[in-house]
Amino acid sequence: MKSPVVKRSIVVAGHKTSVSLEEAFWNGMKEISGLRNMTLSELVGEIDSNRQQGNLSSAIRLFVLDYFRTRAMPAAAGPDARPQA
């Protein structure tokens, strides 16, 4: 059985590194970088420079999860939703 994790090489801050992510996270990263008009390498560099701890793959997964979760929250709450205190 083929592993769902895909390992790719990417240049971050001028250094080549490899990142292992599931295909869904690679697709999410491509979508985000396209919406921001930046390259995948630039987006990964931004994530890398802002991470507090953990490895780069984990930081990317958390970034993508947070990005799409944040975008989904207003839609899921509905137009009449009020902020919780």
Image: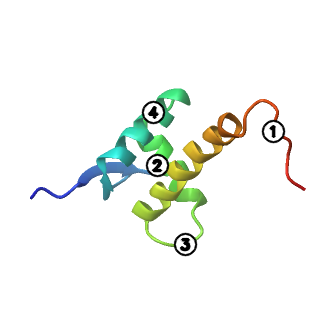
Q: Residue 81 got which mark?
A: 1
Count neighbours of disc 2 (C-alpha within 10 A) and say few if under 14, some if 14 to 19, many if 20 or more: many
- State the separation of the CA atoms marked 3 and 1: 34 Å
Mark closer to the chain start, 1 or 4: 4
The percent position of residue 29, horizontal first and vertical second, equals: 43, 41
**Marking on residue 44:** 2
Relative depth, front residue between 10 and 82: 82
Q: CA distance from mark 3 to mark 4?
A: 25 Å
Mark 4 falls on what kind of element? helix
Q: Name the quarter where the C terminus is drawn.
A: bottom right
79 up-or-down from 23: above or below? above
**Quick one: 40 or 65, which is closer to the camera?**
65
Mark 4 Cα within 10 Å, few/some/many (few <14, many 20+)?
Answer: some
Residue 52 is labelled as none
Q: CA–CA distance between discs 2 and 3?
A: 15 Å
Quick one: quadrant of the N terminus?
bottom left
Name the kind of residue labelled 1 in the image: Ala
**Amino acid identity at mark 3:** Gln
For residue 38, side relative to residue 25 (left or right)? right
Task: Classify 14 as above or below 75.
Answer: below
First-in-chain label (3 vs 4): 4
Task: Give the residue displayed 67% in from the left and 42% down from the top.
Answer: 73
